[in-house]
Amino acid sequence: MSEPVYFPLPISDEPAAYGTKLPEGQMSSYGYHSWWCRNNGSDETGISVEDHGPICNSSFIGASVRPATFDQGGGYLSVDLVSPYTHGVYKAEDMKVVHHYDRRLRLIWSPTGNPDGDELDLHITSSEARSLAAALLRAADMDEFGKSSR
Ligand SMILES: [Zn+2]
């Protein structure tokens, strides 16, 4: 599966030396992992994007659901964490996008169960995830306990 375009690639593989004045519209970034990243298997910093990839992502966190209709089979919903990983010199406009997508929960719905198949890739903030979780808990309570759970 190719990575979404909103995790940009650097225009130069190495960050600018401290104190270097970059041309207008460029920003330098030194690569630090998210603590949950499994891409490199270490806490090493400053790894090139070529060696690490443009995102940090966690291991599969979980969730298993059945498809909505009887004749669909094998679908799954997975949850993990993603965050842009940046190391090098970037276009400033790309870094705005990076900051927008910093630290998201990723929900992937695969109706066929095939990881390389037709997937819905949804990125949400922690706050949005808590709202969704609260709604799911409320719906589950209503289903199992009825009106008495208010
Ligand atoms: Zn990482």
Image: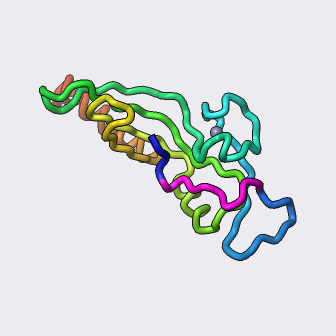
Q: Which of these two is toward me, 2 or 147?
A: 2
Check residue 8 for magenta coloring: yes
Please tell me how many numbered marks the rendered image carries: 0
Horizontally, residue 30 falls left or right of residue 114, namely right
Classify 99 as above or below 139: below
Horizontally, residue 55 falls left or right of residue 73, namely right
Horizontally, residue 26 falls left or right of residue 79, namely right
Look at the image and tell me whether residue 133 can be seen. Answer: no
Q: Residue at x 61, y 43 (%)?
A: 53
Q: Residue at x 49, y 46 (%)?
A: 3
Q: Position of residue 104 (x, y in %)?
A: 50, 45
Q: Specify the quarter for ligand 1.
A: top right
Quarter holding the N terminus is top left
Quarter holding the C terminus is top left
Horizontally, residue 39 falls left or right of residue 16, namely left
Magenta span: chief secondary structure: loop
Colour pattern of the rendering: rainbow
Q: Residue furthest left?
A: 70
Check residue 55 for magenta coloring: no
**Magenta extent:** 5-14
Q: Residue at x 43, y 47 (%)?
A: 124
Classify 109 as above or below 6: above
Classify 132 as above or below 86: above
Look at the image and tell me whether residue 79 can be seen. Answer: yes
Classify 11 as above or below 80: below
Q: Quadrant of residue 45?
A: top right
Q: Quadrant of residue 113?
A: top left
Q: Position of residue 65 (x, y in %)?
A: 28, 27
Q: Position of residue 74 (x, y in %)?
A: 26, 25
Q: Residue at x 39, y 46 (%)?
A: 122
Q: Position of residue 114 (x, y in %)?
A: 33, 30
